[in-house]
Amino acid sequence: MSKNFEDAYKAEVQQNIPDLWNRIESSLPEKTPVVAAETMAPEVKAETIASADKRQNTKSNRKTKKNPYAWIKWASLAAAGLLLVILTPTVLGIGIFSLISGSKMSSDMAANESCAEEPQYAADAEENMMYDADGMEGGFTMDSVTEEAVQEEMAEDVATPESGVQSTPESEGKESVAEQEMGEQESVSAESVYGEMVAEGLKAKVSGIITSSDGIYYRVDLYFEGEDKEIANELFGNDDCYNGDELVVRVYYDITLKPEMLEEYTVTIYRVTTESSGAEETYLQYAAELN
Amino acid sequence: MTQSEFEASVAKIKRGDKEGLKEIYEAYISYIYTIVLGVVGNRENAEDVTSEFFIKIWTVADAYQSNGAHKAWLATIARNMALDFLRKNKREIPTEEFEEDVSLSETPEEEVVGEMSVQEALSTLNEAERQVVDMKVLGEMSFKEISESLGIPMGTVTWRYQNAIKKLRRCGYE
């Protein structure tokens, strides 16, 4: 017969609670009591009020007494003003100078930085030229691959079998180029594209395709049972894309693995935090990498 | 302990009356100790942190402002103190070791082992799984909080927790 682990564990820990009171009590620092006026005894309260009145009286007496040296205060104020008038131009001059030199320095630094970036840029351009010179017809470099382009390609790939269009040798050639490039692209992790990984090792079934203006998404049903469901509730409970049983996500654009309808996959879920999500639909807050 | 009882105890502490702290101690020692043990994962350290917790309550009670949720306030302080302890003693977070030698294989898919005590069941978990289970069950922390406090991805946390639950199921626990 199965027992509830959480309850059993908590019960067991609570059976063995140590007695720490003596240890705590001996370590308590001395405390000055904070006494509120309302909680004081009447005689203490009266005494406090009386002493407060006394203090106030003394203060008012001090105020009415004329200070014979009051003129010194005014004289020192006038002297300070005069000093300020003399010193201000000098101080301002230094200030402006330092501001100008500071801005010059920062622009110099920016210029240096841009110069430092140039060799890398040049190296990239050189690499691209070499890549183009290999004779790849209509090919695209890795740098120029945008997610939209890949999504379009995914759309074509998905549409092809459904529309019954036969692939030509030419298109096969293109596919092999694309596959080759996607192979290189495998180094780009879903995490770097989308954002934080939130769950892995979940079972999922591709149950539908959602066509949106910014690409094609797959509806992926994740099966949650028992503890998995508890985890899912905590992870996705507040999200529109989760209805308690299934989670609608977009699929990571790794087109080397085309999602098959009704196929079951082990998936890793990412929270889409980057702009590259392009998700117009608010419920597409997660991406799934199919394994 | 009701909110008004708690506030009365705090008022006593403000007056320097240790009785107020003792009332809170008696009402919440098991709750606080369980949370702390869940985070630090070791009885000796849990006792240290729990003691420090009540000493802290004694000193911060003056600043306490009633918001009607004193239990959550206490839990937050306890958890933060335990996490601070973990950060300061990062190199020594020994999960409690158990003497019982339960020979179970690591794969959770194997057949269910008969009834086991909680400790026996816990001994089937590895240290990382045990830590996540403790933080989740005893420390009442969310996966996000665990992930942040351990500095590991949330996916790893949920993965470890799932694995641990599978192993515990095999020991007859749900």
Image (cartoon, coloured by chain):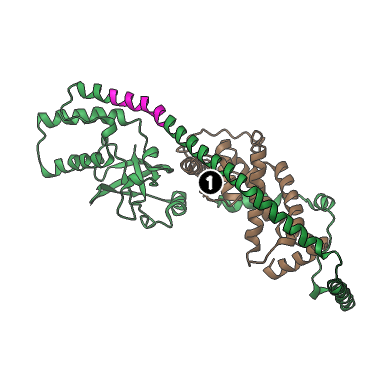
> Which chain gets the brown colouring?
B
Q: What amino acid type is highlighted by mark number 1?
A: Gly
Say left or right for A66 vs A234: right
The subunit letter for the residue under badge 1 reads: B
Question: Which x, y percent locates residue A141?
Answer: 25, 29
Circle 1 sits in a helix, a strand or a loop, which is it?
loop
Q: Examine the image and state in which quarter residue A142 appears.
A: top left
Taking the image as shown, residue A47 lies to the left or right of residue B26, namely: right
Q: Is residue B72 left or right of residue A182?
A: right
| Number of callouts | 1
Would you identify the image quadrant in which residue A267 lies? top left
Q: Which residue is mark 1?
A: B172
Q: Quadrant of the C terminus of chain A?
A: top left
Q: Is residue A2 above or below residue A141?
A: below
Q: Main secondary structure of the magenta part?
A: helix
Q: Nearer the viewer, residue B123 or A252?
A: A252
Instruction: Identify by letter the chain in green.
Output: A
Residue A119 magenta-highlighted: yes
Q: Nearer the viewer, residue A209 or B42?
A: A209
Q: x, y (%) of residue B16?
A: 83, 62
Is residue B35 at all visible to an observer of this figure? no
Residue visible at 78% across and 50% down? Answer: A20
State left or right for residue B12 relative to residue A208: right
Question: What span is colored magenta in the figure?
Answer: A114-127
Between residues A196 and A274, which one lies in front from this camera angle?
A: A274
Asked if residue A214 lies in the magenta stretch, the reply is no
Say which of A81 and A285 sits in front. A81
